[in-house]
Amino acid sequence: MPRRTSSARNDGVRTTYADNNKNKIIVSKISQSLKKGGKAIISVMNLASTEYNAKYKFRLKDSSKELLELQASSIMEKTGNVFDPDYYLIDVETKIVYRKEMFTNGNKYPTELIIRDKRFYMDEIVKMCEDENLKVIEKRFVKAGWKKDFDENEAREILLICEKI
């Protein structure tokens, strides 16, 4: 689901898609919107940590049983903590993360959705940026903020500062 963020200079969209071609388009559009020397801050969810902490793994092409049995949560609506391993499972082949979300606020009836998202390994998102003429000048594994001492298995997100070359 897209999350809008805003900065003093422009309004950006924070999102990832299960289809990686769409993610490449996002990075391409970031690059196209910058002048040479312009900078972008890119934050993506960390797949290494997600895999490390995962309790549930499956292969969707073999069976959807695990997905159907996954417990629904209201995490998106209440806390936004989409990293709780009790509420997601990973397709071991495609590396897509699945969650069931229950939404009740503002709805006459509760709505349950299956959410799919793409999370990234550090080298994967760095290469995606470099392929679009974005030089990564800083990269970190983060939970929140810019603390330096998280390793890839504990950090929820990857934060990059890129410069258009």
Image (spheres, rainbow, N blue to C red):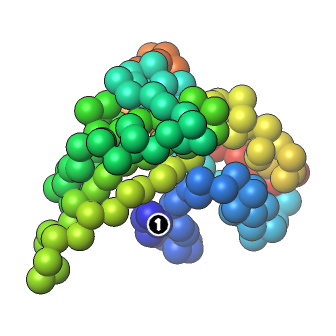
Residue 147 visible to an observer of this rendering? no
The answer to which of 15 and 52 lies nearer the viewer is 52
For the residue pair 57 and 149, the one nearer the viewer reads as 57
Residue 160 percent coordinates (x, y): 62, 41
In-image side of 135 versus 95 (left or right):
right
Q: Residue at x 48, y 53 (%)?
A: 116
Count the labels in the image: 1
Figure quadrant of the N terminus: bottom left
Which of 107/156 is in front? Answer: 107
How packed is label 1: few (under 14 Cα within 10 Å), some, or many (20 or more)?
few
Q: What residue do we see at 22% from left, 60% from top? A: 102
Q: Is residue 25 above or below residue 136?
A: below
Provide the secondary structure element on which disc 1 rests. loop
Image height of 142 relative to 7, above or below: above
The residue at 54%/25% (across/down) is 48
Name the residue at 85% across, 59% down: 36
Say whether residue 122 is visible: yes
Name the residue type under label 1.
Answer: Pro
| Left/right of residue 104 with respect to residue 29 in the rendered view | left
According to the picture, the residue beneath numbered tag 1 turns out to be 2
Residue 28 locus on image (x, y percent) = 78, 61
Residue 36 vertical position relative to residue 93 in the rendered view, above or below: below
Q: Quadrant of residue 127?
A: top right
- Residue 90 relative to residue 37: left or right: left
Relative image position of residue 123 (x, y in whole percent): 72, 29
Which residue lies most toward the bottom here? 108
